[in-house]
Image (cartoon, grey):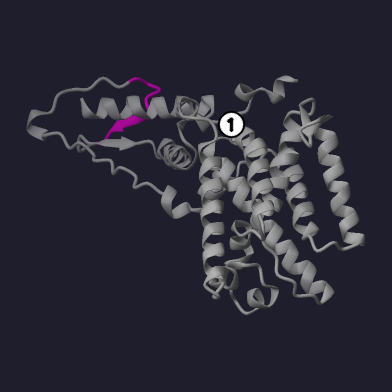
Amino acid sequence: MGIQDRDYYRNEGPSVFDSLIPRGVMCRWLIAINVGVFFLQMVSQATGEPWVNQWFVLDVNAVRNGQVWRLLTYAFLHGGYIHIFFNMLFLWWFGSDIEQLYGRHEFLAIYLTSALCGGIAYEAWELAWGSAIPCLGASGSIMTMLILCAFHYPRRIIYAFSILPIPIWLFAIFSLLGDFLGLINPTGVAVVVHITGAAFAAVYYKSQRNITQMLSGLMWWRNRRPRARLKLFQPDPEREEPVAVSANSSTAITASGSYSVDEHLEAKLDAILEKIAKLGKDSLTQEEQQILQQASQMYKKRRT
């Protein structure tokens, strides 16, 4: 295992707080939600009114009519006990490792984004072929977890059917080959969603982009912080005392006795404060930190 595969090497990994809580918390919540929704499916079908499937399954025509929530909600529905059992089993096996690597929030973002991409891909595929077969299941997101695990832990051995030892990368390849064969000879399984999940995992791993950071960057209205207004100190002319100013100082004294701030430095300070509001203080370069320190010293002199 190379250094890039170690947990502490990844900048977007879990925080110190995440390491103190039980492993796979978000993964357990997803499993609980899937099982809870499946229970609702069974109850609604037993009553003769399967409203859960009617409202949340990925129905191609319903999405065309504006019910776009189905592009995501289909991933929380399942078609039977065996379907949900193996999906939740694989979700725990592979998803808990991905949550440990990336942290709870990023893991959830990966899961939901891959499900959404799979729903969009299936919608486009069915429209292209003129079909309208409903789709449900979390297999696309679970395929994403499998491929990401194969990228991070290529030497890991898993046991197929609890007997046959096989490297995880080989298991992933066999799974993808079966899906591609399903495109040629349709088997009633939404293999397009599986392939999309695998493609999403490959793009995500290679690009190393953090989804939660990208989303927080898009929500610019939440990142804007009111800038503290600077108040100029106006000394009492009758009690004015001489002030020593160095030759390279960024401030000067006007004839009225007030301070005149270097406009060039203030413009740089505005840009630095805006960068801190968006990206945090750790994003500053050494030069920007020096400018911030210089401005701080300047305003301290003005208050004395």
Q: Is 184 on the left or on the right of 304, as rendered?
A: right
Q: Where residue 226 sits in the image (x, y, percent)?
A: 34, 47
Position of the C terminus, as image quadrant, is top left
Q: Amino acid at mark 1?
A: Gln
Compared to residue 24, the image places residue 217 above or below, namely below
- Residue plotted at (54% across, 50% down): 215
Position of the N terminus, as image quadrant, is top right
Q: Which residue is mark 1?
A: 100
- Residue plotted at (62% across, 80% down): 65
Q: Quadrant of residue 240?
A: top left
Q: Quadrant of residue 72?
A: bottom right
Q: Decide: few, some or many residues near mark 1? Use Cα within 10 Å; few <14, some 14-19, many ≥20.
A: some
Can you name the residue that lies furthest to the bottom here?
Answer: 65
Q: Where residue 149 sits in the image (x, y, percent)?
A: 72, 35
Q: Is 31 on the left or on the right of 155, as rendered?
A: left
Compared to residue 42, the image places residue 35 above or below, namely above
Instruction: Compare residues 80 and 192 and report the one nearer the observer.
Output: 80
Which element type, helix, strand or loop, lies under badge 1?
Answer: helix
- Residue plotted at (55% across, 45% down): 212
Determine if the magenta segment contains residue 205.
no
Tell me if I can see residue 180 in this picture. Answer: yes
- Residue plotted at (79% across, 25% down): 155
Overall secondary structure of the magenta section: loop
- Highlighted range, magenta: 246-254
Q: Where residue 91 sits in the image (x, y, percent)?
A: 64, 42
Total labels: the figure holds 1
Instruction: Compare residues 137 and 148 and report the one nearer the observer.
Output: 137
Determine if the magenta segment contains residue 250.
yes
Compared to residue 60, the image places residue 175 above or below, namely above
Can you name the residue that lies furthest to the front here?
Answer: 46
Instruction: Compare residues 274 and 198 and report the one nearer the observer.
Output: 198
